[in-house]
Amino acid sequence: MQFQSGWLMAICFQQLLVVDAANFEERCLQFRPQAFVDDSQLTRLEYLTEGTDAVFPENDPSCNSYKQQVKANLCRIGLTIKTSERSEISFELWLPEKWAGKRLLSTGNGGVDGCIIYPDLAYGSSHGFATLGTNNGHNGKSARAMLNNEDVVIDYSYRALHTGTRAGKRLAEAFYGAGPAYSYYSGCSLGGRMGIQAADLYPDDYDGIVAGAPAVDFNLLQGQRAMFFNVTGAAGGGSPDYIETGTWKGLVHDEVLRQCDGLDGVRDGIIEVPSRCRFDPGTLLCAAATRRGTRRGTRRGNRPPSPPPPQSECLNEAQVEQLRSIYAEYRWPNGTLLFPRMNPGNEIAATEGLLAGKPFNYSVEYYRYEVTNDPSWDMSRFSFDVIRRGERTNPGRIRTYPTTLQRFQARGGKAIVYHGGQDQQITSFNSERFYERLAGHQDQEDSSSSSSTSAAAAAVAAMDGWYRFFRIAGMQHCGGGPGAWVFGQGGGVAAVTPSTSSTSETTGDGDDGDGDGGDGFDPATNVLAAAVAWVEGGRAPATILGTKYVNDSVALGVDFQRRHCRYPQAQTYLGGDAKQASSWECR
C-alpha cells in the first residue's frame, strides 16, 4: 500500500509537469522515470528528433551496436532496474511524440545475448508504439555472467522481459497521462521463445504476440545443435572425411535442390514445403569404379594409383553417412525422438554455424554457464547424459514447451508465429511439432465442427481462433534467404514492407498506425500490423504476403512477392509466372 500511494503521488506530480511543459521536448526532459519504477536508477533521458542518431557508447563491444537512427520524434529513457540482490537489467523505452493507438511494444533478444536490439526499437517507435527492450539481465553476447548465478539465468529466461514490460506500462501511463490501450510483443529466435513463455507465465502481459523461429523445447534444442560438431568433425583437423565448406555450398546444396526444389512445380531455389523433402545423400556416393582407381597399383604395369575424385564431384562412404546423420531426426539411444531434423536447403548459411566444423557457441555457453557451472566444459564432454542433465536442471525454467497456453487463449490473446523453411539455426520442423502439441490439447467443445469433421480439423479450427503459424518458404533464420522474407518482422530491411491492395482477410482499420497500409504498415504485408488488425479489429490473417527485394536491396526494387500460408495449409503452384503471387494458392 505504501508503494501504491507513493506511485500515485508521483503520477500526480508528473501530471503537473505535463501541464506546465510547453512542448513534447520539455515534457520529455522534465520527466522523472525513476520515480515510477522500484529499485531503478536513471541512465539516460534525452529528446531525439526524427532522422538523428541514438548513441550508446557504453554498449558492450560484442553487441556491435553503437548508434541507431530514430524514425520519429521521441523521448528516450534508460534505466537500470534491480531484479534481485545480485541481478539487474538495463532497460530502454522509446516514447514517440505521436502515440498512435496508445500501443506498447516489447521486443526480445537473440542467442545468449544481453544486447538490446535497437533497430527493433526504432521500428516500433516509427509506427507509433511506445517501444521497449532490455539486455536480458547481462551485457554482451556471452553467458559468462550466468555462472553460479541463478538470478541472472532467471532474468535471461523470463524475468527481464516481464520486468521491462511492467515498467514500460507504468512509464507510458505516467508520461502520456493514460496507460496503453493494447500491449504487443515481437521477437525472433530466443526472442520467439520469450514470447511463447510470456504467454505461458504472464498471459496478461500482451494482447498480441509475434514470435519468429521460437526456440521452444530449449534444453533439447541446445543438445541438437551441439550434436552437429560431433558428426562433422573439426575444420582443418586433417580428416579425409571432413566435408569442406565449398562442398556444402556446392555439391550438397545443389543435390538437395535437384531432389527437392521441383517438388512444388517450380525450380527457383526455394523448397516451398520442406516437410515433403526427404533428401537421399546416397546419390552423392562416388562410383565403385572411381573408388577402385584409388587402390595402390594394378596388375598391369603397376601404374601409380589415380587420385581420389575431388569433393566437388562426389563423396566417400563415411561422408555420405555423415549426411545421413545430419539430415535425420536426432534420436535418443532408445530410438525415441530427441529433436526434429534439420531443414533441407539451408546448407549455404549453415556453413557459418551448425556445419562450420566447430562447436556451436550458443550450446557450449549454455552447458558451461547454465547447466554445469563449469567454464572449462567443452565438446569433448558432450553426451546424451549432459543433454539429460540440461533437461532435468531446466535452468531458469527456460525449457518453454507447454502443452497448452489456455490462460492466454481464454483472455482473448492472439499469437502469430512464423518460421523460415531454410532456417540454418533452428529447424522449422520444431515449430510444426509445437503447433501440433498445442493443437492436440485444444478444448474443441465450442468449435463449429460437425459430427463428420475429423478431430484434427476441429483442432485446427480451434487453433485458428487465437494461434496462427506461418511457414515462410525460402527464409533463413529470422530473415534473409532466396524466399520472400520481408514482412515487417523487425527492424532493418525487414521493416520496409510495401503497401498492397491485394485481397486478404486482413484489411485496413484506420490511420495513424492503425494498420491501414499507410507508410508500409499494412496487415496484408506486415506481420506486426496483422497482429494489430487481429487484436483490435478481429481480422485474423489468412496469409502473409512476403516481399523479396532484388539482391535484398530496397533501392533496387521488388523482385517478387509470395503469400505465405498458415499451417497446416501448404503453398501450391497454379501455373504461370512463378514470381506473381497470384500464381500460388494455399491449400
Image (spheres, rainbow, N blue to C red):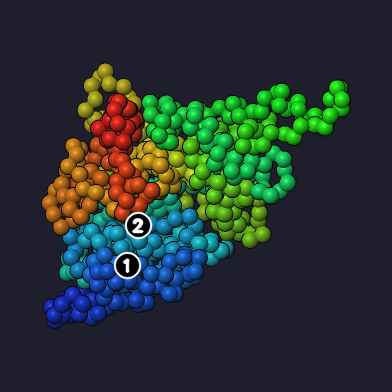
**Amino acid type at mark 2:** Gly
Look at 56% across and 64% down and name the residue there: 144
Q: Position of residue 241 (x, y in %)?
A: 69, 39
Circle 1 Cα neighbour tier, 10 Å, few/some/many (<14 / 14–19 / ≥20): some
Above or below — where is 350 with respect to 569? below
- In this view of the protein, which residue sits in the foreground, 257 or 167? 257
| Residue 49 image position (x, y, % from top left) | 24, 72
Toward the viewer: 230 or 119? 119
Q: Quadrant of residue 562?
A: top left
Q: Which mark is residue 492?
A: 2
**Would residue 558 be found to the left or right of residue 503 on screen?**
right
- Residue at 60% x, 57% y: name it: 368
Q: Please tell me which residue is depicted at 54% across the width and 53% down the height of the picture.
A: 362
Task: Give the residue pinned by disc 1.
Answer: 69
Is 452 on the left-hand or right-hand side of 63? left
Which is more N-terminal, label 2 or label 1?
1
Q: Is residue 535 visible?
A: no
